[in-house]
Image (cartoon, rainbow, N blue to C red):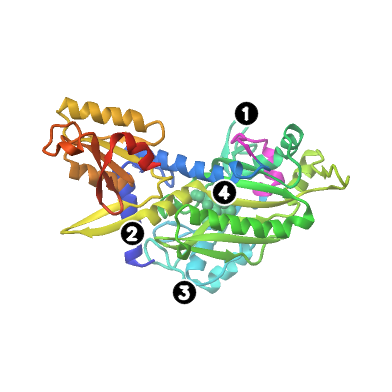
Amino acid sequence: MSEEKNDVLEKIVSLCKRRGFVYPSSEIYGGFGAVYDFGPYGVELARNIREAWWTAMVRDHENIVGLDSAIFMHPKVWEASGHVSGFSDPLAECRKCHTRVRVDHLLEEAGVFADEKMTETEINALFSENKEKIVCPKCGQKDFTEAKAFNLLVQSNLGNFTGDWTKEPTYLRGETCQGIYVNFKNVLDSSRVKVPFGIAQIGKAFRNEITARQFIFRKREFEQMEMQYFVHPKQAEAVYEEWRVKRFQYYLDLGIKKEHLHWHQHENLVFYVKVAWDIEYKFPFGFKELEGIHNRSDYDLSQHSKFSGVDLSYRDPQTNEKYIPWIVETSVGLDRTFLAVMTEAYTEEVVGEDTRIVLKFPKKLAPVQVAIFPLMKNKPELVEKARKIFTMLKKNFRVEFDDNGNVGKRYRRQDEIGTPYCVTVDFDTIGQGEDKTIEGTVTVRDRDTMEQTRVKIEELEKYFL
Ligand code: ATP
């Protein structure tokens, strides 16, 4: 990580706090590792991202339906999925400063590839072979304990009123897609879908992540946006390629530059995953996974058939063929998308003697689309007119009324929250200025060009649309 790149992340973190996008959780108690809260503008941005994803996946596809499954599920789900036995990361501790580290990540940073499937013994062998290259990110020492497989599932005592809940835990889901798999039959029986079809879901997931770094890139409570597409085994390969194309285009449509996106193909896959590519984004700390696209074969439905005893195969109504559908999965984190959108939008521009910070969000994602200012807050005629415009525009746009401080300060604030347009009601608007010919017009200021135009009030809606 270069200093300059870290610097950008720090600036984004600071802006997120200062302008109410993201706060550290329980901050008055000193924060809570790798857990964050969305503030007033963050919650709006997150909603707009969810909406963009839902539109691209559900609304735009006749054969994709939505689902909202519960966070808690039968504990057997996590046995069937393999999470109880195999959902772990290799954890070691620095003997000097006791910082916990993810060995696979440290190996990767040192240029040594650690396979996800490696056993504890294999990881430890690789770890000791490369001892000299691996330093503690906190104190710089090279003395670590052995790596231990650390299970990432978060446990709870839900429903266990008598026994030792650590022995019979229920889990907070580690991924949202299991809720989709176990509802495959319900959706099939209760809606009009036929294979090929997809089920999409947005929801919280929980992982006991070992390292809490890189802001909201790696959270312990995060949100996933996942779509599982059920296909005939013979179609899986072609369908997979179609989804790769669509998902890449989705990010371009979100305003992300092509050169900030990368494809990364996984090698050494677990046996049931036939092919896996990640879409990586150029975060301030380098290219990292934003979304995973996987061809998961018939593994998920087969496992749940086996563990539940319920047949999850599909009978084709036309050919009568019976088979377990294969699954093509697209899985992205809301929080990572949020950070990608923030990174992409963050801009510093020199204007005269000042540096202007501006978030150049695409208009559909901006938390506030139009800010409306009365030039002065103690002139009732200006305030009244501005309120009328607010009421008119709020039907079609996300608007904010702002009468705090001078107009220059308000522009600066709106730039920092990424508002594409500011509307100012001044004395000319209400016919009390010098130029009577522009009565009934307002100043519209463009966030990106900073240009100001006079627009008639009754044409404002059309102008913004
Ligand atoms: P990583 O290798 O970075 O831990 P992963 O391969 O475990 O990620 P998946 O299990 O494939 O991730 O989850 C799908 C998506 O969910 C990821 O592409 C990412 O966008 C998001 N995601 C996973 N873990 C986290 C997390 N701890 N915080 C925020 N988002 C996450």
**Within 10 Å of the Cα at label 1, are there few (<14), some (14-19), or many (20+) other Cα atoms?**
few
**Disc 4 residue type?**
Leu
Identify the magenta region: 65-84
In the image, what residue occupies the spot 22% across and 60% down? 350
Residue wearing tag 4: 152
Horizontal placement of 289 versus 177: left or right?
A: left
Question: Which of the labelled discs sits on residue 8, or is there none?
Answer: 2
* Disc 3 secondary structure class: helix
Alpha-carbon distance for marks 4 and 2? 30 Å
User: Where residue 76 appears, x then y in whole percent?
Assistant: 70, 39
Q: Amino acid at mark 2?
A: Val
For the residues labelled 1 and 3, say whether their Cβ atoms are less than 8 Å apart: no
Whether the magenta-drawn stretch holds residue 351 is answered as no
Earlier in the chain: of badge 4 and badge 2, it is 2
Instruction: Pick whichever of labels 1 and 3 is earlier in the sequence.
Output: 3
> Could you give the CA–CA distance between mark 4 and mark 3, rounded to whole angstroms?
28 Å
Residue that mark 1 sits on: 159
Residue occupied by mark 3: 132
Q: Is residue 237 left or right of residue 14?
A: right
Q: Amino acid at mark 1?
A: Gly
Give yes or no for residue 78 being in the magenta stretch.
yes
Q: Camera-side residue: 129 or 296?
A: 296
